Amino acid sequence: MKPVGSITRGTTNPNRLRRVDNYVAYRCGDLLRDADDPLVIDLGYGATPVTAVELRARLATAVRPDVTVVGLEIDPVRVAAALPHADPPRLEFRRGGFELAGLRPTVVRAFNVLRQYDEGEVAAAWSAMTATGAVLIEGTCDELGRIATWAVVEAGEPTTLTLSARLADLDHPAVFAERLPKALIHHNVPGQPVHELLWALGRAWETEATPFGPRQRWLATCRRMSDVWPVLDGPARWRLGELTVPWT
């Protein structure tokens, strides 16, 4: 099966995807626990396999020890470089793209992959990665993983948007604008819902200035947002620096 997609830049760092890994365990934990074959695909893991190795370790600890992670890359050189880090059958590396190498995963994580594509190509990629029923977590983050956003996509349709930050480094929620998923980044203009969301979040952050530190400020910001926006989850996730809203 020929891989579908293009080779990414391959930039990666240890712990870069820790925030989204923890969200995968939270959001998809029950799905994986109930699955006969708890398979997760790390699509486009990059020049080194560190994010796939970390994903496997985190899910094995937080969800179930027999979870399987398969890292897929289009570049055969990257696959060959990753093979020494494999731990079959629970951690493997193969060549593949949006067609998922013919596998039928429960969850797909595709991070910093679609950013290089045209917006018009996103829907087809989402549909391909969820065609067999997988839940897709697709998004982007900065180089160190301190600012991230992601969509949950099911059956080709986005259901939620999450903004996530390392609160100790958060100066202002405006920084999320640079890391929006490809499907949204060009819509951050007046009159568009994502622009209204970020504007409201910024105003709430400015209003809730406090001497008690960024976590308390973020919690107060999320509470204020939940008064006027359909904010999902609650304080337990807010404390981690997350805010999730319905995609609509």
Image (cartoon, helix red, strand yellow):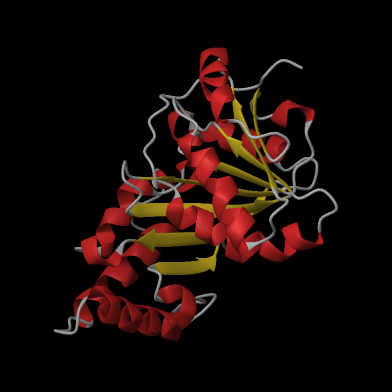
Q: Relative to the observer, which residue lies in front, 91 or 245?
A: 91
Looking at the image, residue 175 sits to the left or right of residue 182; the answer is left
Percent position of residue 141, x then y:
38, 46
The residue that appears at 49% across and 54% down in the rendered structure is 20
237 up-or-down from 122: above or below: below
The residue that appears at 34% across and 63% down in the rendered structure is 198
Residue projecting furthest to the right: 36
9 up-or-down from 185: above or below: above
Residue 9 in sight in this render:
yes
Q: Relative to the observer, which residue lies in front, 35 or 110?
A: 35
Percent position of residue 96, x then y:
66, 24
Looking at the image, residue 77 sits to the left or right of residue 170; the answer is right
Percent position of residue 77, x then y:
52, 13
Q: Quadrant of the N terminus?
A: top right
Residue projecting furthest to the left: 211
Residue 159 in sight in this render:
no
What is the quadrant of residue 196 in the picture?
Answer: bottom left
74 up-or-down from 30: above or below: above
What is the quadrant of residue 85 in the picture?
Answer: top right
The residue that appears at 59% across and 46% down in the rendered structure is 56
Q: Relative to the observer, which residue lies in front, 174 or 76?
A: 76
